[in-house]
């Protein structure tokens, strides 16, 4: 037996507090994550800006090239008109007038196309207006020279002066077109240099932010790995502390269980000792007193009636005291259990229970159980005794039945009542000492104990089972 006051751990022993696990991601790790996200957003923003600038430059490129193509087409139309007019005047062949007439019909279409392409450029709109006026004048002169040359050809007459004027006007038109083409070429070159510069700047910034982001992400990876390692260490420390605490709790529980069982054995031994002392000492004294009082009563003269009456009351009180002594001794250690066995003690206690409470109590025991170990006998008896006490106090039952029988592997005791039943929370109350005591008695015997409701109806079933062979069974 290990006494609780001499155990290896005192009741106030404490466990070293483990390092607290971090409740969340550390601040510096969160800052690095925010910086990484910000750098990625900057990189994405630069990519979007660069893409938008590239798309805008591409649109401007396309417009400039479209203007150049329109200017070239316009110039081709004018050249065709001029060549057709001149070929007709020189040869007199009407076939040369076909491109001339085509040019007459399409030159304004080309002017409108150029006007639409340069609608956002006021300076270009001015040039287009001037180009339209000059072209209209040149076309008019070409048309006039044809109408004033009734007999064109090598031997015919042609309006040479009108043709020269038309050529001069066409030269001015070609000059404006060449200037506009040169300006578009210059604009395209400027756009190319600007785009190249923007690409270099954006590429450099993107490369820089990418390098910085990669470096930050590498640092973040190291911080996260360190954070995970620290957290694992903290969790391992907590786990070890919990294991140590669980071991300490198990040890304390074992010590308390051993102490509880020791107290139960000591209590039974003290009760048995006190019952013997009361029976041997107080019983013999009360018997001697009773004999002396009866001797005195027989020798008193008849004239001492009042003394005889008082002496009779004393004898009655002495008889009640003897009965009270018997009840006390039976409560401490039932003599029927030691002398006549468990079955007789159960029936006797049940009859006494019915006498005191008026509640019918039926005992179903098919044998005497004389071979049952005394420790097991007293355990079953105490459980029945405590159960009947609880039934009388709380159950509001109309009948009680006690069943004690052998089963495969051991002996089972059932106390069944038809009362109001017991609530689960009542069984777990800290002050349910009776239930705790019954459970500890079964644990001491290596048995099982439970309190449950019947499958049908109301009431309570208190059930205790002790295996037939168990080294944990200890004699009282």
Image (cartoon, rainbow, N blue to C red):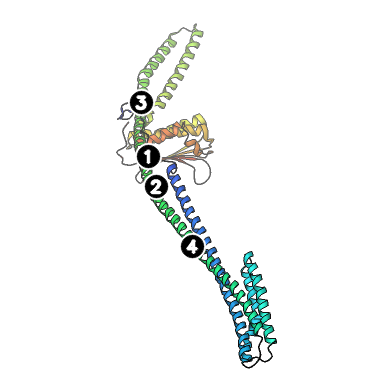
What is the secondary structure assignment of the residue under circle 3?
helix
Question: Along the line of sight, which residue is nearer the eye, 51 or 250?
Answer: 51
Say which label, 2 or 4, has the lower sequence index.
4
Question: Along the line of sight, which residue is nearer the eye, 269 or 356?
Answer: 269
- Residue 272's disc number: 3
- Residue 368's disc number: none
Say which label, 4 or 1, has the lower sequence index.
4
What is the secondary structure assignment of the residue under circle 4?
helix
- Residue 238's disc number: 1
**On the rendered structure, is 89 left or right of 270?**
right
Which residue is the site of mark 4? 193
Q: Which mark's residue is nearer the viewer, 1 or 2?
A: 2
Say which label, 1 or 2, has the lower sequence index.
2
Crowding near pointer 4: few (<14 within 10 Å), some, many (20+)? few
- The image quadrant of residue 469 is top left
Q: Where residue 62 appears, x then y in whole percent?
A: 55, 69
Which residue is the site of mark 2? 224
Q: Is residue 376 visible?
A: no
Q: Where residue 361 appears, x then y in whole percent?
A: 48, 36
Q: CA separation, marks 2 and 4?
A: 45 Å
Crowding near pointer 3: few (<14 within 10 Å), some, many (20+)? many
């Amino acid at each position: 037996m290990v006494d609780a006051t001499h155990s290896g751990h005192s009741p106030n022993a404490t466990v070293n507090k483990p390092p607290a696990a971090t409740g969340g991601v550390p601040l510096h790790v969160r800052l690095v994550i925010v910086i990484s996200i910000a750098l990625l957003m900057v990189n994405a923003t630069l990519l979007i800006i660069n893409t938008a600038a590239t798309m805008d430059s591409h649109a401007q490129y396309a417009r400039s090239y479209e203007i150049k193509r329109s200017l070239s087409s316009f110039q081709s139309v004018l050249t065709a008109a001029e060549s057709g007019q001149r070929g007709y005047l020189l040869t007199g062949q009407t076939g040369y007038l076909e491109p001339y007439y085509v040019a007459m019909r399409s030159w304004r279409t080309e002017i409108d196309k150029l006007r639409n392409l340069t609608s956002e450029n006021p300076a270009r709109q001015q040039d287009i207006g001037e180009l339209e006026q000059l072209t209209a004048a040149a076309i008019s002169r070409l048309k006039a020279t044809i109408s004033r040359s009734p007999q064109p050809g090598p031997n015919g007459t042609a309006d040479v002066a009108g043709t020269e004027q038309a050529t001069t006007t066409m030269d001015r038109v070609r000059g404006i077109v060449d200037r506009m083409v040169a300006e578009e070429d210059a604009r395209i070159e400027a756009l190319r240099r600007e785009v190249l510069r923007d690409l270099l700047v954006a590429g450099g910034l993107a490369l820089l932010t990418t390098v910085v982001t990669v470096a930050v992400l590498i640092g973040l990876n190291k911080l996260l790995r360190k954070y995970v390692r620290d957290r694992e260490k903290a969790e391992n420390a907590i786990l070890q502390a919990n294991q140590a605490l669980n071991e300490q709790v198990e040890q304390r529980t074992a010590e308390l269980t051993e102490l509880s069982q020791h107290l139960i054995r000591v209590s039974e031994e003290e009760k048995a000792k006190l019952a013997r002392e009361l029976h041997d000492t107080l019983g013999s004294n009360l018997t001697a007193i009773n004999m002396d009082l009866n001797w005195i009563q027989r020798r008193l003269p008849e004239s001492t009636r009042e003394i005889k009456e008082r002496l009779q009351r004393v004898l009655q009180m002495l008889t009640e005291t003897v009965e009270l002594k018997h009840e006390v001794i039976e409560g401490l250690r039932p003599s029927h259990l030691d002398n006549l066995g468990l079955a007789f003690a159960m029936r006797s206690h049940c009859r006494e229970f019915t006498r005191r409470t008026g509640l019918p109590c039926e005992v179903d025991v098919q044998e005497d159980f004389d071979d049952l170990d005394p420790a097991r006998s007293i355990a079953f008896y105490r459980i029945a005794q405590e159960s009947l006490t609880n039934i009388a106090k709380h159950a509001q039952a109309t009948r009680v039945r006690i069943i004690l029988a052998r089963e495969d592997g051991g002996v089972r005791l059932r106390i069944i009542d038809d009362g109001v039943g017991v609530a689960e929370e009542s069984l777990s109350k800290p002050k349910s000492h009776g239930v705790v005591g019954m459970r500890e008695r079964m644990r001491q015997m290596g048995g099982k104990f439970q309190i449950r409701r019947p499958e049908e109806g109301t009431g309570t079933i208190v059930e205790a089972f002790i295996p037939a062979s168990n080294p944990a069974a200890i004699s009282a």
